[in-house]
Amino acid sequence: MSAPPVRPASAPSRPARPWPSRCTRWVTPIFFLQLQLTTPLKQNGDRDCTKEAIGGAHYGPVMVYMSKVSDAASADGSTGWFKIFQDGWAKNPSGGSGDDDYWGVKDLNKCCGKMNVKIPSDLPSGDYLLRAEVIALHTAGSPGGAQLYMTCYQLSVTGSGSASPATVLFPGAYKSSDPGIQVNIHAALSNYVVPGPSVYSGGSTKAAGSACSGCESTCSVGSGPKATVSSSPAPSNTAAPGGGGSSGGCEAGKYQQCGGTGYTGCTTCVVSLLRVK
């Protein structure tokens, strides 16, 4: 299975977010899907591989979830989620603190912001939401200090699988006191537990600190295979980022802000449908 290249447009500024969020309330367009699935994660509008994809020592794990839904175009993220991928942490024997260790975010930086994520072949056909997420731990030494960044996509998967993985809910899958969320990475770490459930049996993992491989090394933006992509028509009352109120059919434009603490703009997002074959 594979997915077409989908390149986010422009990213909004990032106010405080409700923690932790479902996909529909705060969508930060940081992941780029290119089938196999490959997720280049870069600063918005920047594909320069000489720069860090995620700068500022925002070290932490990378995770990807999926949720089976009846209609991806209208799903609100309240259904159960199962983890299909993670790249977490590994000890650096020559390091003195968690900052020196190997992290999923460091792997993204090393691979020009790209990470291969396989859509499991044992999934049944139908519509899904996909949640790609980074948890930045540079200020996670106190409760509420971890920073969660995620983006979501609507997928329609075709195949002959029958897997039915156990699921968790967002909010609910994480607690601010979880050892993988409240952690001081500026001290030496002997262990790290990636937040959330384990990757289900049909999913995959990447060992933190491992080399770039496959599309992570060779693919460029727009080079992936093509698939059918259908988008909803642009709304007649689309608001500019950060304004417009939340009533009267107001919709935030694609890849624009549609939620967050203190946000007063449109809370309904324009949707698009990505078909994966």
Image (spheres, rainbow, N blue to C red):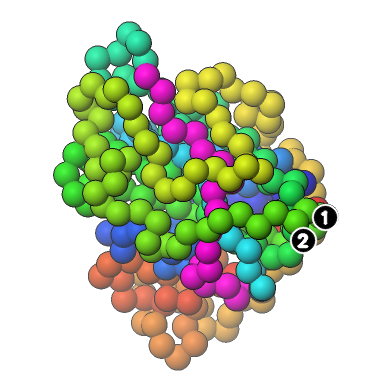
Bounds of the magenta span?
73-91
Could you tell me residue 240's position as x and y percent?
Answer: 44, 71
- The three-letter amino acid code for the residue at tag 2 is Ser
Q: Secondary structure at mark 1?
A: strand
102 horizontally vs 117: left or right: left
Image height of 239 relative to 15, above or below: below
| Residue at image mark 1 | 160
Circle 1 Cα neighbour tier, 10 Å, few/some/many (<14 / 14–19 / ≥20): few
Magenta highlight on residue 8: no
| Residue at image mark 2 | 125
User: Is residue 15 something that shows in the picture?
Assistant: no
Q: Secondary structure at mark 2?
A: strand
Image height of 118 relative to 24, above or below: above
Q: Which is more N-terminal, label 2 or label 1?
A: 2
Could you tell me residue 72's position as x and y percent?
Answer: 64, 69
122 horizontally vs 148: left or right: right
